[in-house]
């Protein structure tokens, strides 16, 4: 079960084996034995990538919970002291406002001896130079010495306030949207500035963080393309309206918690936070209203 979770977390047998101290073939055999025991296929394998089957998605969710409970039980029975110390987190303002703010009270209640220092920035941080323990990053991760825990994927949606639509009219498609003023980021992002790859027409207003863009969109300054989890409540309350982009595919933006080192060698305080984020801090968690 632990090997299966690591394969999903790291996206392949080789990287999971590196973390577990096993060869890729040994990890593959473990997954095969697990599938035989369950009588179900958990992973779709191809030469380029792995994907969870519906049964694999269900088992993965349960496995995360079970392993977390086992870890807690071992610490309690062994008389181990709860993790303690300070954790320095580097995160975007949007993730802090729309994910961390909801889940941190429960985490801090579970681990009363852990303290947090949160650095809010949308720019990519160098963990070693910055002194951060964990960074929350959006977009595809380049190859590096960092290890990542997946926090899920979120669609990128184009939204505008009703007041902006009243002034400008409802665009009929992506071509009409591209001709209008927009809000953009004040730095290069892996997901691009607007709707199509290579479409680089400058935004009239650029902001250094996604939360600032969201607030300006709410004020009716212009339309914006934002991570769906940051605007769910505003869409539900009709403060923001999703604009049509039918001529372009919806892009998914992955989120990760990244850290330096191997998971088996991490301090307990960092490991428990990573485990908590991987379950409760996902950007694709159901919207509760």
Image (tube, helix red, strand yellow):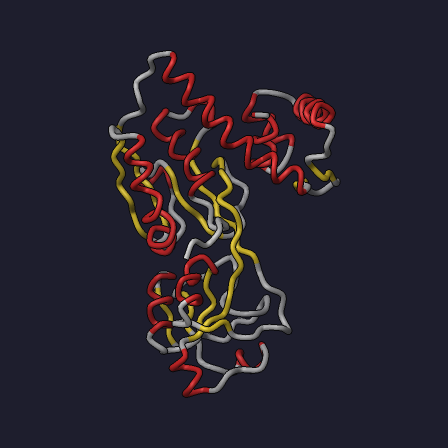
Q: Position of residue 214 (x, y in %)?
A: 37, 66
Quadrant assignment, res 17: top right
Q: In the rendered view, tell whether residue 1 sits above or below residue 88.
A: above
Q: Residue furthest front?
A: 289
- Along the viewing direction, whichever of 47 and 115 lies nearer the viewer: 115
Q: In the rendered view, tell whether residue 84 sits above or below residue 60.
A: above
Q: In the rendered view, tell whether residue 84 sits above or below residue 144.
A: above
Q: Quadrant of the N terminus?
A: top right
Q: Quadrant of the C terminus?
A: bottom left
Q: Residue at x 46, y 46 (%)?
A: 282
Quadrant assignment, res 123: bottom left
Count of numbered tags: 0
Q: Is residue 111 left or right of residue 189?
A: left
Q: Position of residue 23 (x, y in %)?
A: 65, 22
Q: Position of residue 38 (x, y in %)?
A: 69, 27
Q: Position of residue 208 (x, y in %)?
A: 35, 63
Q: Residue at x 74, y 28 (%)?
A: 39
Q: Residue at x 58, y 61 (%)?
A: 251
Q: Residue furthest top?
A: 78
- Along the viewing direction, whichever of 138 and 152 lies nearer the viewer: 152
- Along the viewing direction, whichever of 46 and 205 lies nearer the viewer: 46
Q: Is residue 184 left or right of residue 245?
A: left
Q: Residue at x 40, y 81 (%)?
A: 164
- Along the viewing direction, whichever of 203 and 98 lies nearer the viewer: 98
Q: Is residue 31 left or right of residue 116?
A: right
């Amino acid at each position: 079960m632990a090997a299966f979770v690591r394969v999903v977390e790291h996206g392949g047998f080789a990287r999971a084996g590196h973390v577990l101290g096993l060869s890729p073939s040994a990890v593959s055999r473990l997954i095969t034995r697990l599938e035989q025991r369950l009588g179900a296929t958990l992973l779709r394998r191809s030469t380029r990538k792995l994907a969870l089957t519906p049964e694999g998605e269900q088992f993965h969710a349960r496995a995360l919970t079970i392993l977390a409970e086992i870890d807690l039980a071992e610490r309690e029975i062994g008389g181990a002291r709860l993790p303690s110390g300070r954790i320095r987190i580097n995160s975007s303002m949007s993730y802090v406002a729309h994910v961390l703010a909801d889940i941190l009270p429960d985490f801090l209640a579970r681990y009363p001896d852990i303290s947090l220092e949160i650095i809010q920035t949308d720019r990519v941080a160098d963990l070693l130079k910055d002194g951060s323990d964990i960074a929350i990053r959006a977009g595809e991760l380049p190859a590096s010495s960092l290890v990542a825990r997946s926090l899920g994927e979120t669609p990128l949606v184009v939204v505008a306030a009703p007041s902006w639509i009243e002034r400008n009219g409802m665009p009929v498609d992506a071509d009409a949207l591209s001709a209008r003023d927009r809000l953009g980021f004040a730095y290069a992002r892996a997901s691009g500035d607007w709707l199509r790859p290579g479409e680089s027409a400058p935004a009239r207003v650029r902001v250094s963080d996604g939360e600032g863009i969201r607030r300006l969109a709410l004020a009716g300054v212009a339309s914006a393309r934002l991570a769906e989890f940051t605007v769910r409540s505003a869409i539900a309350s009709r403060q923001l309206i999703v604009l049509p982009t039918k001529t372009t595919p919806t892009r998914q933006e992955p989120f990760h918690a990244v850290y330096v080192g191997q998971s088996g060698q991490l301090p307990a305080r960092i490991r428990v936070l990573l485990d908590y984020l991987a379950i409760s801090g996902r950007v694709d968690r159901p919207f509760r209203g």
